[in-house]
Amino acid sequence: MILLDNISYREDLALTLKGIANLELLKSKTLLITGASGLIASALVDHLLYLNEQDDFGMTLYLAGRHEATLKRRFGHYLDHSMVNFVSYDATQTLGFHEPVDYIIHAASNANPRLYVEAPVDTMLANFEGMHQLLEFAREVGTKRLLYVSSSEVYGQVKGNRAIAEDDYGFVDLLNVRSSYASSKRATETLCISYGQQYGLEINIVRPGYIYGPSARPNDARISSSFIFEALKGKDIVMKSDGSQLRSYCHALDCSAAMLTVLINGHANEAYNIAHSDANLSIREFTSLITQKTGVELVFELPNNLDRKVANPMQNSTLDGQKLMDLGWKCHLSPQVGLEHTINQLKELY
């Protein structure tokens, strides 16, 4: 089954679009979305395809990814529409695309923490050079606005357990290869703002918290996804820490709705956290919700050396989402509801 054909998922699509002001500004526009088969961007594509089913929206979508077959598996017959096009894209290669687009959403990034350690050079270059190419492309074709999907990891280690605001930065160990991800995300944000100032581009940056949802793929190495897939196989969830780390969790469709909110209504050349205070939980609390809904057990094991190297050093990465909410965004799917829907939808999908 294609996720977009799931009735419950379509209801969540409609729910999470509620309250977004000025959506009509996307009518008849052309959008380029990179990383279109990923957890976050594929949920965004679902929203756009859903909107395009409305008779008068008429958006043209260019879905950029490495493999057309991967997008075909994800979106199925929805890719057969003449206004939905595949673009071959690798963030480390020259962009072989020249069509003018109104909006760019750049969500392509290495999202496997293990690769931050095993391939730190690739991680850094893909983040920085990938954005550099897109910024040059946006200049050339006169793109109206570019939205960059960054990360909560740019904040580094912030003292205390307060929710982190957009201008509240902590420590990142520059000599730790695990920082290849956080450091390159930081540098890429500065590159975006520099292009905005020097060349007059309109750019927005979003910093999502910990995203989960049925748009995840079974090989997703992030624990907010991998734990769900392990539980759906009937396997106990193995945690390699005490689970006390604090995180802001967000359903992929709420995250997508936040991205659309910022793209349309956000102030140019500013950053926005994607988070809601009601979804700030410890890793153990979030995992316990999964075990409660699937009937598996949560067990603890000591981490090995690789586990320690790839672990996010941030004890607290809860985010203050007030700036986003001031634009009118609302969290519609709490972790309790969102996880239940995710688990049920994935059962049908796989």
Image (cartoon, grey):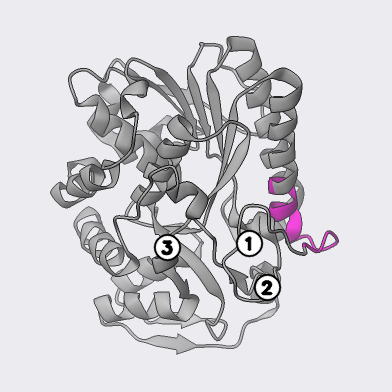
Q: Quadrant of residue 43?
A: top left
Question: Distance between the Cα atoms at labels 1 and 3?
Answer: 15 Å
Q: Position of residue 172 (x, y in %)?
A: 77, 62
- Residue position for label 2: 306
Q: Quadrant of residue 59?
A: top left
| For marks 3 and 2 on the same chain, the one whose residue lies earlier in the sequence | 3
In the foreground, 114 or 282: 282
Q: Position of residue 29 (x, y in %)?
A: 38, 17
Q: Residues within 10 Å of mark 2 (few under 14, many from 20)?
A: few
Badge 2 amino acid: Leu
Badge 3 amino acid: Ser
Q: Quadrant of residue 302?
A: bottom right
Q: Is residue 184 magenta?
A: yes
Q: Are marks 2 and 1 in contact (CB under 8 Å)?
A: yes
- Residue position for label 3: 225
The answer to whether any part of residue 119 appears in the image is no
Badge 1 amino acid: Arg
